[in-house]
């Protein structure tokens, strides 16, 4: 933790009681002037501090941002999120993460922003992330697996985000294969998994996560207003985005490790328990054809199995699904 994060952690822990500049200076072994500089820096980020004469500083308001200072004190992970790159605005966290990963960023690096100007989904589709009311982030992971095991990380991530949303809001999303989380049939989360690999070794997997958190329906572009929802729209409550980021990283670390150590089977069972695809009649739009049939399950490789009306079973690696 940096000194600024330590000061913030102490102010939060004081729960509205004043904490003296001298006490902070003693605990961090730095001068009062340095403490004052850090407090000024926090104020510039939107933290509201009250100075009470002879008593010290009270934290009055925490800004609604997803900065490193807000997320770090909430982390329950060993590796994920231990390096954070925060941008008030950027084109796409996926682009920054890809570049940073190529430059050797460590396993677990988090790239996060308030607003994306060119957020993207699969096949270069646009991802609406203009409002600073969602979570737009990319996590760089470097698991020791072969490239063909990488697509399963989309499913690992879907389970992790579902668990995080469930534990923080009580609202349980459904997973639509392969990368959508839905609440009441509307999309609340999209996942974009990208790979940097040699023929036989994964260099890094970049897990891009977009969660609609505190938007109202008019925050979305008109084109997606009927298909998108946010956690606030579904629960009626403003959610602390930083707390949700920390929870997502916690579950992502837990389930990634489970996958690498124990294989896909335990993740598959969890994924199927949250899925709204399995057992349903669906239409799958592939790059060159459209197939209709009943989704009967996913394989140990995360491939969706579709039973066509002819009885033939087809494995689907990548498609858009219509229920
Ligand atoms: C996805 O693609 O669902 C993956 C989205 C990943 C976004 C994250 S945000 C952080 C990171 N940085 C990025 O640049 N991207 C990742 P796909 O399955 O192709 O779905 C895209 C479709 O979802 C669009 O064509 C719209 O129909 C719809 N859509 C766009 N923005 C949306 C939103 N905010 N909420 C719900 N649906 C949306």
Image (cartoon, helix red, strand yellow):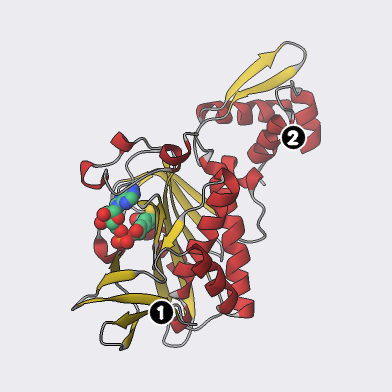
Instruction: Specify whether 214 is left or right of 321.
Output: right
State whether label 2 is within 8 Å of ligand 1: no
Instruction: Specify whether 80 is left or right of 140.
Output: right
Instruction: Specify whether 96 is left or right of 319.
Output: right
- For label 1, the residue is 303
Q: How many angstroms separate mark 2 from mark 1 (CA)? A: 56 Å
Image coordinates of residue 315 in percent, x first then y, are 35, 83
- Among the two numbered marks 2 and 1 on one chain, the one whose residue lies closer to the N terminus: 2
Q: Residues within 10 Å of mark 1 (few under 14, many from 20)?
A: some
Image coordinates of residue 316 in percent, x first then y, are 33, 79
Q: Please give the name of the residue rendered at 41% of the width and 74% of the height, measured from the top-left corner.
A: 196
Image coordinates of residue 76 in percent, x first then y, are 67, 53
Whether residue 221 is visible, yes or no, is: yes
Image coordinates of residue 179 in percent, x first then y, are 39, 64
The residue lying toward the viewer, choosing from 273 and 107, is: 273
Please determine whether, in this image, residue 122 is positioned above or below residue 170. Answer: below
Q: Secondary structure at mark 2?
A: loop
Q: For residue 279, which quarter of the picture?
A: bottom left
Q: Please give the name of the residue rendered at 56% of the width and 46% of the height, measured from the top-left corner.
A: 170
The residue lying toward the viewer, choosing from 228 and 254, is: 228
In the rendered image, the quadrant that contains the C terminus is bottom left
Please determine whether, in this image, residue 288 is positioned above or below residue 56. Answer: below
Q: Secondary structure at mark 1?
A: loop
State whether label 1 is within 8 Å of ligand 1: no
Q: Which one is closest to the eye, mark 2 or mark 1?
A: 1
- For label 2, the residue is 30
Quick check: which quadrant has ligand 1?
A: bottom left
Residues at badges 2 and 1 in contact (C-beta under 8 Å)?
no
Please determine whether, in this image, residue 188 is positioned above or below residue 260. Answer: above
Report the number of numbered marks.
2
Instruction: Specify whether 169 is left or right of 53.
Output: left
Please determine whether, in this image, residue 30 is positioned above or below residue 117. Answer: above
């Amino acid at each position: 933790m940096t000194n600024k994060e330590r000061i913030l952690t102490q102010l939060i822990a004081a729960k509205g009681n004043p904490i003296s500049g001298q006490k902070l200076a003693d605990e961090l072994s730095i001068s009062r002037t340095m403490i004052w500089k850090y407090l000024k820096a926090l104020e510039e980020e939107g933290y509201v501090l009250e100075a009470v004469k002879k008593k010290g500083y009270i934290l009055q308001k925490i800004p609604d941002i997803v900065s490193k200072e807000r997320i770090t004190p909430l982390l329950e992970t060993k590796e994920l999120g231990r390096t954070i790159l925060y941008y008030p605005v950027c084109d796409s966290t996926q682009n920054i993460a890809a570049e940073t990963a190529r430059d050797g960023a460590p396993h677990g690096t988090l790239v996060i922003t308030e607003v994306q100007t060119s957020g993207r989904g699969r096949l270069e589709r646009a991802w609406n992330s203009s409002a600073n009311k969602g979570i737009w982030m990319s996590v760089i992971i470097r698991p020791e697996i072969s490239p063909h095991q990488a697509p399963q990380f989309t499913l690992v991530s879907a389970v992790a985000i579902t668990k995080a949303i469930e534990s923080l809001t009580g609202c349980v999303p459904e997973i639509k294969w392969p990368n959508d989380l839905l609440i009441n049939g509307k999309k609340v989360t999209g996942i974009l998994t990208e790979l940097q690999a040699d023929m036989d070794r994964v260099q890094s997997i970049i897990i891009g996560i977009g969660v609609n958190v505190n938007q109202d329906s008019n925050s979305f572009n008109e084109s997606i207003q009927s298909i998108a929802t946010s956690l606030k729209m579904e629960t009626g409550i403003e959610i602390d985005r930083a707390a949700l980021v920390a929870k997502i990283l916690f579950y992502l670390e837990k389930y990634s490790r489970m996958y690498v150590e124990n294989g896909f089977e335990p993740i598959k069972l969890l994924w199927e328990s949250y899925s709204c695809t399995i057992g349903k009649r669906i239409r799958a739009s592939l790059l060159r054809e459209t197939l209709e049939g009943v989704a009967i399950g996913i394989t140990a490789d995360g491939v969706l199995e579709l039973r066509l009306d002819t009885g033939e079973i087809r494995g689907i690696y990548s498609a858009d699904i219509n229920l």
